Image: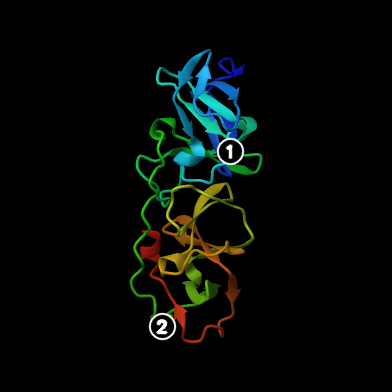
Amino acid sequence: MRPVGSLASDRKALLFSAGGVRLALRLGHVREILAVPPDAGEVSVRGEPVPTAFVSTVLGLAAGGSGFALVTEGPARVALRVEALHGIVDLAEAEVFQLPGRTPLPQPAPFAGAIVARGELALELAVSTLGFAPLEPAEELPPPDGGLGAGTERELRFCRSGRTYAVPMSMLVQILEAPRVAKVPLTPPSHRGLLHHARALHPVVDVGVLYGDAPAAEGRTVLLVDAGGAGVGVVADRVVGVAEGGDEVTRPPWDAVFGV
């Protein structure tokens, strides 16, 4: 058992993981860190049982061996069971973000924001909204209307899940090859995660899922697109030439897709 009261501060955060997702919690919310048997159930602190929540279960993630318990501060203490600890970060040496508005989550959201430290993105837990039971994921976005019209301006074509799509060149900001996209639990299948690029966070969308295709493997390319002044990533398997795709090119109503 390791008390952390002397370190507790809203300017420091504990980094850890559950269900393979990197997470964070401000030290001001942490009373103690306990090493516990991975198969143990309820957690006790100095002989007193503490209500226990398995973070991977609450967030709908694959369960692993939860060998640590983070006992939260306050009268309504909770033991958050997690799988691995990654150290403490001083937030003065990290980047702290609110989640982008185009990150669909159940409400109230289980995340208070995101922290990028040491090149890794961690979702900051909102302890008061977690509870103990599995949370219901956010609903999938409605499918876009139309998308089969002829192109009226210069465009870039790309393939995703066997279809060819086009995005106007005027909206294209950058083409990123094999960027790191951090998964966000409880988002719908079309939301592939968050991309940290150029000191900003960008949601990443799989437009193929919106058009009814089954979720596919991660695309190697992300097109960073200007969505009303904010960048949104669009997953692509590959960029194709203008001559490819023929007349079978889908031109989504991008403003509707991005909610602009």
Q: Say which element carries label 1.
A: strand
Q: Looking at the rendering, which quadrant does residue 229 occupy? A: bottom left
Q: Is residue 225 left or right of residue 129?
A: right
Rendered residue at 46%/42% (across/down): 59
From the top left corner, tell me how far across and down residue 18 is, in percent. 56, 39
From the top left corner, tell me how far across and down residue 120 is, in percent. 62, 43
Q: Quadrant of the C terminus?
A: bottom left
Give the camera-side residue of 156 and 54: 54
Rendered residue at 66%/39% (across/down): 118
Q: Residue 199 shows which numbered tag?
A: none
- Badge 2 local density, few (<14 within 10 Å), some, or many (20+)? few
Q: Is residue 99 left or right of residue 122?
A: left
Distance CA(mark 2)–CA(mark 1): 47 Å
Q: What is the count of numbered marks?
A: 2
- Badge 1 local density, few (<14 within 10 Å), some, or many (20+)? many
Among the two numbered marks 2 and 1 on one chain, the one whose residue lies closer to the N terminus? 1
Rendered residue at 40%/47% (across/down): 105
Q: Amino acid at mark 2?
A: Ala
Give the camera-side residue of 2 and 174: 2
Q: Residue 150 shows which numbered tag?
A: 2
Q: Quadrant of the N terminus?
A: top right
Please name the residue that numbered disc 1 is placed on: 17
Q: Is residue 10 visible?
A: no
Rendered residue at 39%/34% (across/down): 129
